[in-house]
């Protein structure tokens, strides 16, 4: 299969901006109903599989924020697995535009990608790197699952 024939990965996020861990009602309930089918209409932005491939060819399939390499963690199962982040949110464009795979895109792991998009205003890759660095100073690694 060529890059042009590849189907891009679809990513959907929904985050609660409130931390409910301290809510006694939430802690008291042991089961929760999930799985209802809901129809939704959503705007989807087309992405170029060729631009994605060129980005990964240039940077590699390693997260450019936290250095996560799925092949090193999961072996052959993780080879080539990585998200690609647009520095400028694709939803902020007024329509189709030309993407430079090196300047406009960057490989990031799914966790870092979610953290970049955690709030309405997307933070920059450098801001997330800085936050990760600052957190590593105040919260040292505690187990072998961490990077």
Image: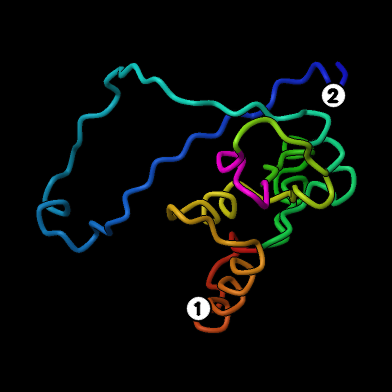
Asked whether 92 falls inside the magenta stretch, the response is yes
- SS for callout 1: loop
Please say if 39 is above or below 46.
above
Asked whether 147 falls inside the magenta stretch, the response is no
Position of residue 118 in the picture relative to residue 95 (left or right): left
Q: Residue at x 59, y 29 (%)?
A: 45
Please say if 106 is above or below 35.
below
Q: Which quadrant of the structure image shows residue 80?
A: top right
- Which label number is shown at residue 60? none
Mark 1 highlights which residue? 139
Mark 2 highlights which residue? 3
Q: Which quadrant of the structure image shows residue 77?
A: top right
Q: Position of residue 134 (x, y in %)?
A: 56, 79
**Which contiguous range is marked in magenta?**
86-93
Query: Label 1: few (<14), some or many (≥20) within 10 Å?
Result: few
Q: Position of residue 35 (x, y in %)?
A: 30, 23
The mark that comes first in sequence, 1 or 2, is 2
Position of residue 14 in the picture relative to residue 100 (left or right): left
């Amino acid at each position: 299969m060529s890059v042009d024939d590849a189907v891009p990965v679809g990513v959907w996020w929904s985050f609660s901006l409130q931390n409910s861990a301290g809510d006694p009602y939430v802690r008291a309930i042991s089961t929760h109903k999930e799985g209802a089918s809901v129809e939704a209409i959503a705007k989807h932005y087309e992405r170029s599989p060729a631009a994605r491939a060129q980005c990964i060819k240039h940077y590699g399939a390693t997260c450019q924020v936290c250095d996560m390499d799925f092949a090193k963690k999961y072996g052959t199962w993780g080879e080539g697995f990585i998200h690609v982040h647009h520095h400028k949110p694709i939803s902020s464009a007024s329509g189709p535009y030309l993407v430079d795979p090196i300047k406009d895109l960057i490989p990031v792991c799914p966790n870092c990608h979610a953290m970049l998009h955690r709030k309405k205003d997307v933070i920059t890759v450098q801001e997330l790197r800085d936050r990760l660095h600052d957190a590593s100073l105040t919260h040292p690694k505690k187990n072998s699952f961490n990077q």
